[in-house]
Amino acid sequence: MTESEAIACTLDPEARKHRREELRGGLLSRVLEAHELADGWALALPMGSEDEARAFVVFEEGCCGFARYAVRRDDAAGRVWLEIRGPEGTREFVARNLPAGLLASDAPLRRAGL
């Protein structure tokens, strides 16, 4: 298996398109900021998004098992963090699936380089 084959979603193309639209109109539309990590992304969501973020993880583990997911609360900042990490290529895979504009220069993107 090549590296590019390892970083892939197992949903068929139609289901993947539907899932992407669903996420862009739902959970990902509420991303407050995105921190680029060395091996993925950390997405800040408003407090109250924890259950939805955990449901996201359960679903995504079934079709994008190459990635590691974590959800954590930051009560002090009033945010929930969704981390998506994985092998080389994960960061680019996730970026291709984020909503248009989130990674634009005027978006609240933070390159943490962690």
Image: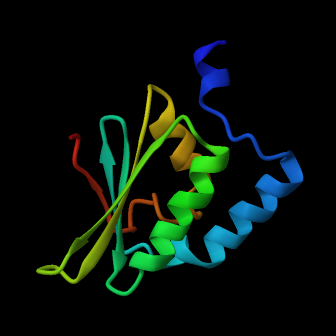
The one of 10 and 101 positioned closer to us in this rendering:
10
76 left or right of 31? left
Count of labels shown? 0
* Quadrant for the C terminus in the image: top left
Quadrant (top left/top right/bottom left/bottom right) for the N terminus? top right
**Chosen colour scheme:** rainbow
At 70% from the left and 61% from the top, the residue drawn is: 20
Is residue 91 shown above or below 103? above
Residue at x 57%, y 39% (from the top left corner): 65
Taking 76 as reference, is 69 left or right?
right
**From the viewer's perspective, is residue 78 above or below residue 1?**
below
Residues 32 and 101: in front is 32
Residue 79: x percent and y percent?
27, 78
* Residue 71 placement (x, y as % from top left): 35, 63
Which residue shows up at 39% across the image and 77% down it? 50
Quadrant of the rendered image containing residue 78: bottom left
> Which residue lies most toward the right here?
14
Q: Position of residue 61 (x, y in %)?
A: 57, 49
Q: Is residue 107 above or below residue 50?
A: above
Question: Which quadrant of the figure has residue 110?
Answer: bottom left
Image coordinates of residue 10 in percent, x first then y, are 74, 40
Furthest residue toward bottom: 48
Residue at point 56%, 40% (across, down): 93
Residue lying farthest top? 1
